[in-house]
Structure formats: structure tokens, C-alpha cells
Image: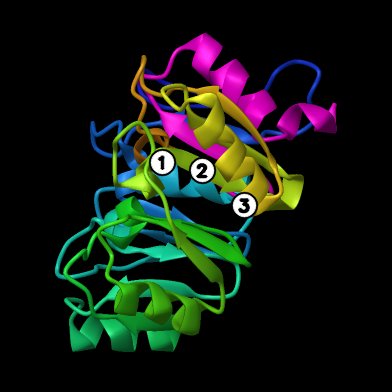
Amino acid sequence: MYNRKTFLYSPPFLKTMHALVTDFNGMVNIGLYAFVNDNFALIGSEISEEVEEQMKEVFQVPIHRVTLAGTSLIGVFTAGNNHKIMIPGITFDHEREHLRKLGINFVVFDTKLTGLGNNILMDDNCALVNPDFSDADVKKIDELMNVKTQRAEFTEVTTVGNLAVLNKSRGRALVSNDLNSEELRLIENTFKIKAIPGSVNMGSPFIRAGTLVNAHGFAMGSASGGPELANADEALGFLEDE
């Protein structure tokens, strides 16, 4: 099933549809508008019902429409793992109440670096964060998320959350091909995974901005080329399903 903008991608040797190539109302940086883990997905209003249904097929989790800070930038404002999510203090009270009604386990983190998704790379046990976070911020992330947190900087870019996506359940990560060998090893050693470099949306190094992933599948922006999709398939561990 596909059209000009959206299709489900499955190599012929795979038995199930596990990947989606799409955009959200013409926006290929889909990771900015959604958050996905192994339990649920949060999406913004720009996502069509058709794409929502395709996301359900790929990710195999309930999908909820929400706003954060009055916007649909769910992926920008959300960092998290399979235990809970962290949202910034600028979210509105009614948005927090909506998350509670949905049964989403969340914590609120008051910080000037409100784009938590861009600034934090996290799994269930560890986090690499923007070096501009204060000592108090780093300690707070530790406490709120119960993870071991350390500062990091990749290719002189401080928004470390935007340069990789983790698929811890498969022991894999897709990371920016701009990372050097030392930075690659830091990700692998921190999260105990195998990291493979790549790009998204025809050469963009901002992997998370163009990619969503959980244990069941992944989605990439519709500007991504065939080699980027094939590389992501391997990098995120789905070729092992053959």
C-alpha cells in the first residue's frame, strides 16, 4: 500500500510490514512531531488518519493525539524510554491532565533547554545529554528518570538527542554518519548496543528528526532514499527477522 508520499516498506524476504516511509502533512522531519516507545505513541494533529493507521500496523502500539506547549512538536519536547516520558515545564496544565487520563507515566522537567527530545538521548538505564545542561539539571534527569546521565557532544553539535535513535530491544542504534569513531564508541559503550552510521531524508545527519522506531518497526521521512532505508533496516536490527 503506497501513494506518492506514504508507503509501507517490506523487503521480499520479510514476512511482516515493519517500516513506514511517510511525511506528516508534507513535513519529512517526522521525528519532530511524534514520540514512540514499545508501549505507546504520541502524535500531533498534522498526522492524517491514514498515516495513523499505518503507524499502528508498523509500531503495534496504541496511538494518542496530544499537544505539548500548545503545539504538535511532540518529538521536540519529549524525551523518554519504556518506563516513562519527560516533558518540559512549559506544557500546559490541561495537556498534563490529558496525559494522565491516557495513563501515560510522565514527569515534568523545568529547564531552559525545553526541547528535551533534541537535547537528550536516552534508554531505560542511561542518558547522554546536551553539555549545556547544568549540574543541577543532570542530577534532576538522574532522579526523574532513574537513569545514569552524562554530558556528551557529537561533531561539535550539542543537541545530541537529534543525532541518533536507539532500538535497545534489538541492541541496535542508527546514528549520524558525521560521528567520529570515538563518538560512535561512546554511544555503543554507554547503551551497550551496536551503532551503525547513516543518514535520513537524502543526507540529513539529524537522524531522530527524520526517524521513529520501537521494537516492532520504524518510520522514516519520505525524502529518504532506498540506500538510507536499507541501511536503517540493518542498523535497527530488523534484518535479523528474515
Label drawn at residue 208? 1
In the rendered image, the vertical position of residue 132 relative to residue 52, given as above or below: below
Residue 193: horizontal and vertical position, in percent? 70, 44
Residue 119: horizontal and vertical position, in percent? 32, 55
Badge 3 marks a residue whose secondary structure is helix
Q: Residue at x 39, y 49 (%)?
A: 161
Looking at the rendered image, the disc whose residue lies closer to the viewer, 3 or 2, is 3
The quadrant where residue 231 appears:
top right
Q: Residues within 10 Å of mark 2 (few under 14, many from 20)?
A: many
Which residue type does callout 1 highlight? Arg
Q: Which residues are magenta?
A: 213-242
Q: Which residue is mark 2?
A: 165
Residue 33 appears in the picture as rendered: yes
Q: Residue at x 33, y 82 (%)?
A: 108
**Dot 2 and dot 1 residues touching (CB under 8 Å):** yes
**Dot 3 and dot 1 residues touching (CB under 8 Å):** no
Q: Residue at x 22, y 58 (%)?
A: 72
The quadrant where residue 69 appears:
bottom left
Which residue type does callout 3 highlight? Thr
Badge 1 marks a residue whose secondary structure is helix
Which residue type does callout 2 highlight? Val
Badge 2 marks a residue whose secondary structure is strand
Q: CA distance from mark 3 to mark 2?
A: 14 Å
Q: Residue at x 43, y 81 (%)?
A: 106
